[in-house]
Every structure is written in C-alpha cells, then in structure tokens.
Amino acid sequence: MTAAQSPTAVRDELFGPSRRATTIGIVLLISLIAFEAMGVNTAMPALVADLGGVALYAWPFVSFMAASVFATVLGGRWCDRAGPAVPLVVSPLMFGVGLLVAGTATTMTQLLVGRVLQGAGAGMSSVAIFVLIAAVYPERARPAVFGLISSAWVLPALLGPPVSGLVTQALSWHWVFLGLVPLVLVATALVVPAVRTLTPPERGAGAGRRGVVPAAFAASAGVAALSWASQHVSVLAAVVGAVSVAVLVPALLRLFPRGVFRLGRGIPTIVASRGLLAGVFFTINSYLPLMLEATHGWSLATAGIPLIVGALAWSGASAWQGKHPDLPRERLLRIGFCAVTVGAAGMLLVAPTWGVPWLALPFWAIAGLGMGLGFSSVSFLLLQQSEPHETGFHTSAAQIADQLGTATLIGAGGAVLALLGTPAAALPVLIAVLVALGLVGVLGAPRTAGQTGSANTTTLSE
C-alpha cells in the first residue's frame, strides 16, 4: 500500500458506476442544508421585519436548533434499529416540506412551523448520511468522502450570503426557502437507489437503550434555551442558561457514551473531540468579525475575509487528507488540534486594542487547516470504531457535542462581553479559555485510539 491514493483511485471509489449517484446525492443534501443555513442568516432581518419585528429575531434560530437536536437523537436510534434507508428518504422530504411551509409563510407562527420541520429534517439527514457512509463506502474511501462533505459547506459559505441577499432584494425572502425545494427532490432521488440495497443491522445493545426519547426532548429544550440565552445579555438570560445546564446534564448522561467527560479511551474521546473542535473554532469564528470591526475599525465586509480564508483552508486540508487514507487518524487529529489551538492563540495578538488586526488572516488560515484535518479524522475514527448497531447513536452523540459545545461557548462569550463591557477587554479572556480547551484536545487526541466493540459503547443507562 502507498501512503496516498492516486487521483484516479479516489475518483473510482467515489464516482464509480455503483456509487456515483450516492456520492452526488450526499454532497447535494449537505450543500442544501448549508445553503439554507447561510441564506437564512442573511435574509433574517428582512424576514422578521415582515412577519414579527426584531423582538422575535432569535426564535427562528432557536426553533431550528431545538428540532435538530431532537431529530438527531431519534434519527440515530432509528438508524441503529432499522438501518438508514427510511430516514434517508423521510428526512430530506421533511426538510423540503419545511422549506415550502416557511417559504409561503404569512405569519411568524407558520414560519416557526417550517423552521421546526427544516431542523428536524436537517438533524436526521446528517445522522443518516453518516450511517450510509459506513454501510456503502469501504474504509479507505471514507477520508475522501469526508473531504467532499467538508467542501460541500465551503461554496454555500462563500456564495450563500450574497446570493441570499440578492434574492431577498430582487424577489423576496420567500424565495430563499422556495428556491431550494426542487434540489431537495433531486438529491432524494439520487440516494434512493443506494438505500434500496441496504439491510437493517443486527439487533444489538443500541436497540435496547432506554430513556432516549425523554432525554432527547430534554436535550432539545436545554440546547434551545441555551441558544436563546447566548443571544441575550440580561439577568433572565443568565437564569435561563443556568437552568438549561441543569436540564442538559442528566439528559447527556443518557445520550453520550460513558466516559465522554473524562475522555475515556476510544469512542468517548472521539465524541468529546468533536465538541472541543467545534466549540473552539466556531466560537472564535462568531466573534472574529466583531473583534475586527469594533476594536480595529474594519468594515463588516472586510472583517468577514478571515472567515473566508479559514473556510478555504478547511476545505483544502480536508481534500488533502482524503488522498492519504493510510495516515494514522489519531495523529492527524492531534495535528489538527494543534493547528486550531495555534490559530486561536494567535487571536490574542489581534483582540486587544494594541493588537495587529491583519494577523487574523494567517492565524485563521492555520485554524482552518486544523479543522480540515481534525473534523475529517473525528468522522473517520467514529465510523471505524462503531459497531453497525451503534453507528447512529455515536453519530448523534458527536453532533450533539458539536452543537452543545458551540452554543455553550458562544453563550459564555456573551456573558463575558456583558461583564467586561467591550470586545477589546472581553475577547482576550474568552480566547484564553478556548486555547486551554484546545490544549485539552491536543493532549486527549491519542486517546481516540481504542478497541472496536462494546467496551467503548456502553452507556450509563445500561
């Protein structure tokens, strides 16, 4: 074996006659979810002004988040019990119906119903796609698949906001939703041939897991409340955040593999790594434009350039690792954590009033490279070490760790801003915490090497 696959070999694994439609369908589904996410962010000011006013600004995001968390858990359980065939058809159609409902909304209530359907479809689709990858693609092809999935987020990140803005101005915000509906039908049709050949996994430990549904509901409510609290700075928001954490902790003990919080070897550390990577990167990603605009006087358009640089670096690194399936993923994950931590630490030279703002460009490129290596490695290791009847559970756990880590740390940033008053004073404190979490990931990455089997998949509920 060679350390790298030839471009022809990679192309054959992904786009050979037996997998071409499946690969295109997966990439299209991910791209649609990404375009919707990026487009709605841009169209939201016009949307809330039309339907309900700025006081309701957070609710379309909160409703999407809550439904996504709930459907992520239920989708994982469904896939473990019966395989991904039905969820892979139901979830994109649910997402499409949500687009129709939101796109024809004349009231905020109807819009929120649409956002709930979209969130449920997006959450379930993400889990089902990972289970499909485990079932259809050989292990050596999976790094390349994850490289494609990462790339599927880059174009929407670059084009989603400006296209959404143009559509909203030239036509209406309604078409930000409605314009994607035909593509949902195409993507669903492309994955149908693959799901017809799938068989349900053998019934295993995951099929008998108890308490998942109420835990999923509690996690959904807790993450939604935490997301809302992160967008408000008040005593009420602080109380809501504290109650959210109190609700989330017992729920997560059901929904996470045992040992996540102490970085247990194998699957627990893999799940924790997903949360750490997402939390560190996306928190700084959220506050970086504020840092450059409020502290250094950059325009909002210019302040967004480091985000584009980071996204392109992420895509490039993810594509590179896809061509090197023989490299140890534990090592790539550790390198990825190192790069993300260095990129985060570099922001300490940008955030203060005496900081050098242009350093955000190279340092965020380094962080993007780290995400390209780290995120793909986490996904590969998760599937490699999961038994077929546990793949959905582990995938949903990793996605919840991602969502929860990001929501919690962004909320913490809002609290620090409220306490210290200015970005120049508050953001260095937040960044220091994020650097420390990055170092936890660096030290924990070697613990992602674990034995496949039930030793890594037992939960506290058993």
Image: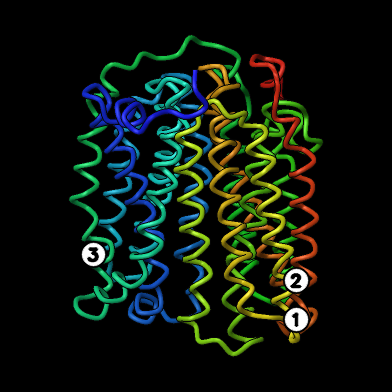
Q: Is residue 157 above or below residue 450?
A: below
Looking at the image, the residue that sits furthest to the top is: 202
Asked whether the residues under the numbered discs 1 and 3 touch, taking CB atoms below 8 Å apart as contact, a structural biologist would say: no
Residue drawn at (51%, 69%) of the image:
58
Residue nearest the observer in this picture, 178 or 316: 316
Under circle 1, the secondary element is: loop
Asked whether the residues under the numbered discs 3 and 2 touch, taking CB atoms below 8 Å apart as contact, a structural biologist would say: no
Q: Is residue 107 above or below residue 90?
A: below
Identify the residue position indicated by label 3 in the image: 104
Distance between mark 3 and mark 2 Cα atoms: 45 Å
User: Residue 146's spot in the image, x, y percent?
Assistant: 45, 38
Q: Is residue 394 above or below residue 216?
A: above
Residue drawn at (31%, 35%) of the image:
90
Residue drawn at (71%, 58%) of the image:
342
User: Residue 169's spot in the image, x, y percent?
Assistant: 25, 81
Q: Amino acid at mark 1?
A: Pro
Quadrant of residue 166 within the rendered picture: bottom left
Residue drawn at (49%, 73%) of the image:
305
Q: Amino acid at mark 3?
A: Thr
Identify the residue position indicated by label 1 in the image: 352
User: Residue 167's spot in the image, x, y percent?
Assistant: 24, 73
Position of 195 with respect to 410 (left or right) is left
Position of 255 with respect to 324 (left or right) is right
Residue nearest the observer in this picture, 51 or 456: 456
Disc nearer the start of the sequence (1/3): 3
In the rendering, which numbered label is found on residue 348? 2
* Eye-nearest disc, 3 or 2: 2
Under circle 3, the secondary element is: loop
In the rendering, which numbered label is found on residue 126? none
